[in-house]
Image (cartoon, coloured by chain):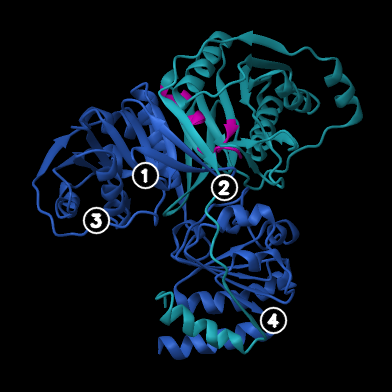
Amino acid sequence: MVNIAVLVKQVPDTNSKIQISGDRVDLSSVKMDISPYDEFAVENALQHKESTGGTVSAITVGGAAADKVLKGVKALGVDNIIRLDYDGFMDSNGLQSIIAEEIIAGGYDIVYCGKSAADTGAGSTGPGIAERLGWASVSNATEVKFADALTVSYPTEGGDAIVSLNLPAVVSCDKGSIKVRKSNVKGIMMAKKAQVDVKAVSPPAASVTVVSQVMPPAKPAGKKFEGASSAQTVAQLLRDEANII
Amino acid sequence: MTETIVIAELSKGEINNTTNELVSAANLLGNSCTVVVPCTDSSVADKAGKISGVSKVIAAKSSVFENYDAAAWAEAIDSVAPSGIVVTSASAQSKDLAARLAARRTISVVQDVIAIEDGKLSTPIYSGKAIQNVSVNGDSVVSIRANTFAPADDSGSCDVQVIDTTGNVTTALQEMVQRASERLDVSEANIIISGGRGMGTPANFSHLENIADKLGAAVGASRAAVDTWDEIPHSMQVGQTGKTVNPNLYIAVGISGAIQHLAGMRSSKYIVAINKDADAPIFQHADYGIVATWEDALPVLSSSLSDLLA
């Protein structure tokens, strides 16, 4: 029986507009959702369980508002939902150390996560916790085959690498060809009643401090031309003005 | 004296120009730069010795560098790299390595840095919809987006020290599957031409390929195109749930400019938009906008480029 963990994170819906208030991003009117790549991690975790037997525990870090994302994956068929209760900024060292502690405490064999979260886009958590645990890892996995050892595909400069790795391991998941399941009414009803296992954590002091969050510098207005014949003008500008071609 | 350690970026077994950009970034973070070159053959490292602003080159020689293995690479590089601020590229593989190295040293990692000012690091958040500025206390690992820092020139000269190293390999490469297409991946290209659902059919992407061939460009796609047509793979998708790119030139054809897509390409140096809808949001981000159907505009663009490149 494989003890499977999947890391999920609540982030602003990727279609939402991000606004700044003062010198911080203002998320008060933004719709929150599960980070897109985490959906592939959850699907891989569930398929792993269905293929070899086991249990799947979803773990998130955040305040009570993050329970929504846990209920959402519970409705998909995750067995246990766990929230590491911390609602402030953590640097990668802090975040990875509390997650690694939880992975050890839970006795997990494998951790799935998204290749990066849609807010920071960093992609550090998967490989970072693998290093802390002394585990193997593959990042940006586009296909996972489950057996005693995993077979994982991921893109490289030279083509798609297909590697095998033994558990324990961390796999960070890209989109690939996997289709994610949708929740049904029964799952949603069950998830409503499910208890979130809330755990207190105490991350080490951060060495990274957020100084400010700002809008990207506005681009000066460009040149807009009407009609297909202007494509010739644009080609010329790409040579004379932009020095690109 | 702040020590910086640049992990050289290699492509096809050679140190590439991104490494010169990393040295420039490192010299904004500290004042003594060591370049560590992961290699199986130490002669590869000679090129790093010529980069200006480098005070030392370490050729980290090991058979583990034949194929990528995150655990083994981190261990092998960690054992030869001095302590300080470690600088890597923000390619997919190097971000993975950066995270491993930082965790190994129990320090933090700051990924995708696009600017450094007074020791403060700027990184895109929400796929570039906003920028976060951070300060870091003590050692860290920092990954740098390619094409954002001016490369250091090749007028330097310093010796290369070869150190044999090793690490514990945890993954076994079974097969390397060549890509079906010979074309560059969008994450590696200096010029990208992308199509959206406005292309009408996936077969019409051949018109983009025609121009890509002239420019040595990669062909990308919007999420709408990838979601609509099975023939357009996710590997081509540019945007928040696809690849984030910052080429010198990005040509968006039949792409309206959804927030999702803009997030993945807005940092491109020059943006050309071709769209029949004059009000398409993409035009607000375009350096050069052409209001026309792609059917009319692409043949003109194609022949103009042929004339210029002849």
Query: Label for residue B57?
Result: none
Judging by the rendered image, the residue that carries numbered circle 2 is: A215
Of callouts 4 and 1, the N-terminal one: 1
Left or right, B166 with reference to A15: left
Q: Are marks 2 and 3 in contact (CB under 8 Å)?
A: no
Residue A69: image quadrant is top right
Query: Label for residue B116?
Result: 1
Judging by the rendered image, the residue that carries numbered circle 4 is: B292
Type of amino acid at the residue the image marks with label 4: Ala
Look at the image and give the colour of chain A: cyan
Q: Are marks 2 and 3 on the same chain?
A: no
Which element type, helix, strand or loop, lies under badge 4? loop
Of callouts 3 and 4, the N-terminal one: 3
Label 3, residues with CA under 10 Å away: few <14, some 14-19, many ≥20: many
Q: Residue at x 72, y 33 (%)?
A: A28
Which element type, helix, strand or loop, lies under badge 3? loop
Label 4, residues with CA under 10 Å away: few <14, some 14-19, many ≥20: many
**Mark 2 and mark 3: Cα distance apart in space:** 29 Å
